[in-house]
Image: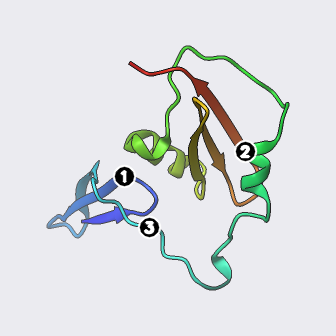
C-alpha cells in the first residue's frame, strides 16, 4: 500500500504468483505531502499569490455550481493533481465574498469568487 502524494488516493496492491500485481486505487483520508528537496523544488514565482488575489479584469464566467475549495473534495483535488501536478490552493472570505485561488509554479493562476450562502 502506498499513498499517491498530492492526492487523496492510496494504491493498494497484492503480488500475484506470476510476479505481477493486482490492486486498486482507494480513497485515502490522511494523504501525504510531496517530498521536496534541492533543485527540484519549484516555489511559486514571487508575487503570484498577490497577483491572483488582487488583479482586476480578465475573463469572467458565471456558473450555476457552488464555489468549491479543491482540498475539501478529495476526488477533485486528486484529479487536478494527476492532470496538472503542483497546483497550490488558497481560499479566504472578506466582506461576504468567498474567493478560491489555484496557482501553479509556472506562474499561471485562476480565481473564483462567490457571494451569498450555500444552504
- Locate the N terminus by quadrant: bottom left
In front of the other: 118 or 32: 118
Tell me: 88 left or right of 57.
Answer: left
Counting every numbered tag in the picture gives: 3
Question: What residue is drawn where x is 43% and y is 21%?
Answer: 118
- Specify which label sits upstream in the sequence, 2 or 1: 1
Residue 53 is tagged as 2
- Specify which label sits upstream in the sequence, 1 or 3: 1
Binning the other alpha carbons within 10 Å of mark 2 as few (below 14), some (14 to 19) or many (20 upward) gives: some
Binning the other alpha carbons within 10 Å of mark 3 as few (below 14), some (14 to 19) or many (20 upward) gives: few
Tell me: 8 left or right of 19.
Answer: right
Q: Residue furthest right?
A: 57
The image's colour scheme reads rainbow
Alpha carbon distance from label 1 to label 3: 11 Å
SS type, badge 3: loop
Q: Residue furthest left?
A: 17
Tag in front: 2 or 3: 2
Binning the other alpha carbons within 10 Å of mark 1 as few (below 14), some (14 to 19) or many (20 upward) gives: many
Quarter residue 38 falls in: bottom right
Residue 8 is tagged as 1
In front of the other: 97 or 30: 97
Looking at the image, residue 34 lies above or below residue 97: below
SS type, badge 2: helix
Tell me: 65 left or right of 104.
Answer: left
Residue at mark 3: 33
Question: What residue is drawn where x is 23% and y is 70%?
Answer: 19
Tell me: 114 left or right of 48.
Answer: left
- Locate the C terminus by quadrant: top left
Alpha carbon distance from label 2 to label 1: 26 Å
Q: Position of residue 88 (x, y in %)?
A: 59, 55
Amino acid at each position: 500500500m502506498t499513498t499517491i502524494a498530492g492526492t487523496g488516493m492510496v494504491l493498494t496492491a497484492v503480488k500475484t504468483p506470476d510476479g505481477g500485481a493486482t490492486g486498486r486505487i482507494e480513497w485515502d483520508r490522511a494523504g501525504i505531502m510531496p517530498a521536496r528537496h534541492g533543485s527540484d523544488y519549484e516555489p511559486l514565482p514571487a508575487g503570484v499569490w498577490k497577483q491572483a488575489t488582487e488583479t482586476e479584469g480578465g475573463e469572467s464566467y458565471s456558473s450555476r455550481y457552488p464555489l468549491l475549495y479543491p482540498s475539501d473534495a478529495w476526488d477533485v483535488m486528486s484529479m487536478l493533481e494527476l492532470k496538472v501536478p503542483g497546483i497550490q490552493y488558497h481560499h479566504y472570505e472578506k466582506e461576504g465574498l468567498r474567493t478560491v485561488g489555484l496557482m501553479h509554479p509556472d506562474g499561471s493562476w485562476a480565481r473564483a469568487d462567490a457571494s451569498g450562502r450555500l444552504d
